Image (spheres, helix red, strand yellow):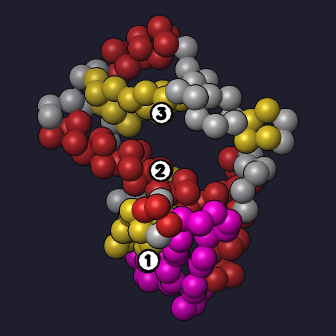
Amino acid sequence: MASIKGIALKAVKTGIGHDFGGFQANIYLHNKKIGHVLDDGWGGDLQLDFDKQEEEFDQLAEAYRTETNETLLSATDHLIYSLMDLIEAEKAYKKSVKQGYNIYLYLDYRPKEQGDVPVPKTKEESYQCATVEFAEKLIKEKKPVAYEIYSSLNDFVIA
């Protein structure tokens, strides 16, 4: 199951809120439910409601933000959105495995940021690959700004 620093999202429901652009999920820390997150789809920060361990969650979120050099989002929003992306990648990887592919490759062609202005996604692609060698060949040919190679479920656990 996708997790970052021991934090995971479960019971994720997407397509809620304004124009079906939001989501909600339960927040788990070390396999124990500690709260709930809601993105109502109207913009602004995520709505977080904690039952316990909010301080530990905030410390882990800030550490992850520092490690990834995130400067635009709050630490908690960055962590939750990163988890949502990781969950989607994990679903795609599992689908690839069912179809007989061992590798799921994600390529990102957008610059991370230009100054302090976030850059919208201009192009991203994903591929199902049979071997790491083929994935590496695609990376050399396509020359993305960033990429991720997923080859096992362990790739979705970020310490």
Q: How far is disc 2 from disc 3 in space, using C-alphas?
A: 12 Å
Q: Amino acid at mark 1?
A: Asn
In the drawing, what numbered circle is on residue 26? Answer: 1
Q: Name the residue rendered at 72%, 56% in the picture.
A: 73
Whole-percent x, y for residue 115 in the image: 85, 36
In the drawing, what numbered circle is on residue 148? Answer: 3
Whole-percent x, y for residue 35 in the image: 51, 83
Query: In the rendered view, does 33 fall on the left or right side of 68?
Result: left
For the magenta stretch, what is the residue range? 26-53
Q: Amino acid at mark 2?
A: Asp
Residue, far bottom: 51
Q: How far is disc 3 from disc 1 in space, using C-alphas?
A: 26 Å
Q: Name the residue rendered at 49%, 13% in the picture.
A: 142
In the drawing, what numbered circle is on residue 85? Answer: 2
First-in-chain label (3 vs 1): 1
Disc 1 element: strand
Q: How far is disc 1 from disc 2 in space, using C-alphas?
A: 16 Å
